[in-house]
Image (cartoon, grey):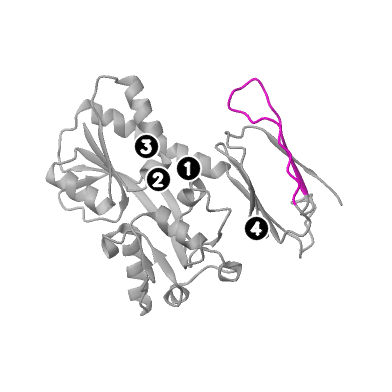
């Protein structure tokens, strides 16, 4: 059984997907390839792959495209907070030092295709200062201050950059939509049908993990809203251990009062506290199930 996915799927869902499929059908051979969505569409159309999970839009000639299985937002990320104070317009992008992934496919890449259409409609040109192949490389370069980038927010969170870089939506927001594709009127094997069903559930799992992620920014130069943020920039974070293996052990972190900005990320997969002014990072690394944040006054 040969199945294709968008290029960054191995970060977000492939491990769990393949493990779940193998547990149900241990004797079925699986060939899973992660490519640019345009390349997956070509491979499905040519019969090299039986089906795929891709980002839209692509050339869908000779293909059947399912209803949207998952939607994620692509955001603008930068090391400079001044560049993320308001949603970024296409005109803003035209004057930015952009680092864009999918160098090989360029405007054929679904996300870059949307950016190209926006720039053409607004009469501006988007010329990246750096093009690389992988979104992970684009994020790493952005974190080094080489330029700014536009990447799917769930991927930036998974790779740990949502807390290291400032980010903001585009204006209007840019959404990546994902769907399954098969050859038109093709008869799918039972194994492929099962895999597509599991992949659909995996996509929903990515959505749920994103919804659980809380990003709380605390800034010392503004008065906290005690109804919403009942703590000072000095914070004590405690996690409680239970009998479940996937819960964290006890951890405490004191954030220095000189910190300009503190980001606390809480999700089902990680707890990360990033002190931007000192570049300090504490990541217990286990799935977070229960946490309490209490005030600490100095």
Secondary structure beneath disc 2? strand
User: Cβ–Cβ below 8 Å for labels 1 and 2?
Assistant: yes
Q: Is residue 274 visible?
A: yes
Q: Residues within 10 Å of mark 2 (few under 14, many from 20)?
A: some
Badge 4 density bin: few <14, some 14–19, many ≥20, Cα 10 Å = some
Q: Which mark is residue 70?
A: 2
- Decide: few, some or many residues near mark 3? Use Cα within 10 Å; few <14, some 14-19, many ≥20: some
- Pick whichever of labels 3 and 2 is earlier in the sequence: 3
The span from disc 3 to disc 2 (Cα, nearest Å) is 15 Å
Which callout, 4 or 3, points at the residue further toward the start of the chain?
Answer: 3
Say what secondary structure mark 3 lies in: helix
Q: CA distance from mark 3 to mark 1?
A: 15 Å
Mark 3 and mark 1 lie on one chain; the one further toward the N terminus is 3
Q: Which residue is mark 1?
A: 207
Q: Which residue is mark 4?
A: 276
- Disc with the residue nearer the chain's start (1 vs 4): 1
Numbered tag placed on residue 14 in the rendering: 3
The residue lying at 21 percent from left, 56 percent from top is 59
Gap in angstroms between the C-alphas marked 1 and 4: 27 Å
Q: CA–CA distance between discs 4 and 3?
A: 32 Å
Across and down, in percent, residue 293 comes to 74, 41
Q: Secondary structure at mark 4?
A: loop
70 lies left or right of 5? right
| Residue 253 falls within the magenta-colored stretch | yes
Which is in the foreground here, disc 3 or disc 1?
A: 3
Q: Which residue: 29% across, 20% down?
A: 26
Image: magenta residue range: 235-255
Residue under the image location 59 percent in, 23 percent down:
245
Instruction: Inspect this view and state whether residue 172 appears.
Output: no
Q: Residue furthest left?
A: 46
């Amino acid at each position: 059984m040969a199945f294709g996915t968008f290029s960054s799927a191995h970060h977000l869902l492939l491990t769990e997907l393949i493990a779940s499929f193998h547990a149900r059908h241990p004797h079925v051979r699986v060939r899973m390839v992660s490519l640019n969505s345009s390349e997956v569409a070509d491979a499905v159309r040519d019969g090299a792959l039986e089906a795929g999970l891709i980002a839209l839009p692509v050339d869908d000639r000779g293909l059947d495209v399912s209803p949207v299985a998952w939607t994620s937002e692509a955001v603008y990320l930068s090391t400079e907070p001044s560049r993320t104070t308001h949603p970024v317009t296409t005109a803003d992008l035209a004057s930015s030092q952009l680092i864009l992934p999918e160098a090989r496919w360029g405007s054929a890449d679904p996300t870059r295709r949307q950016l190209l259409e926006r720039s053409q409609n607004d009469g501006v040109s988007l010329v990246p200062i750096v093009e690389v192949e992988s979104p992970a490389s684009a994020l790493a370069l952005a974190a080094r201050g080489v330029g700014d980038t536009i990447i799917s927010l769930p991927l930036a969170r998974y790779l740990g950059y949502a807390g290291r870089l400032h980010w903001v939506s585009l204006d209007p927001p840019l959404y990546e939509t994902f769907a399954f594709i098969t050859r038109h009127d093709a008869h799918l094997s039972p194994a492929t049908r099962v895999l597509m069903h599991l992949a659909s559930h995996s996509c929903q799992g990515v959505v749920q993990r994103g919804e659980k992620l809380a990003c709380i920014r605390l800034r010392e130069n503004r008065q906290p809203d005690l109804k919403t943020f009942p703590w000072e920039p000095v914070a004590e974070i405690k996690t409680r251990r239970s009998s479940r293996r996937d819960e964290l052990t006890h951890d405490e972190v004191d954030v220095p009062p000189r910190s300009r900005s503190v980001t606390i990320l809480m999700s089902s997969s990680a707890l990360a506290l990033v002190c931007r002014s000192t570049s300090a990072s504490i990541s217990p690394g286990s799935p977070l199930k229960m946490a309490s944040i209490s005030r600490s006054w100095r």
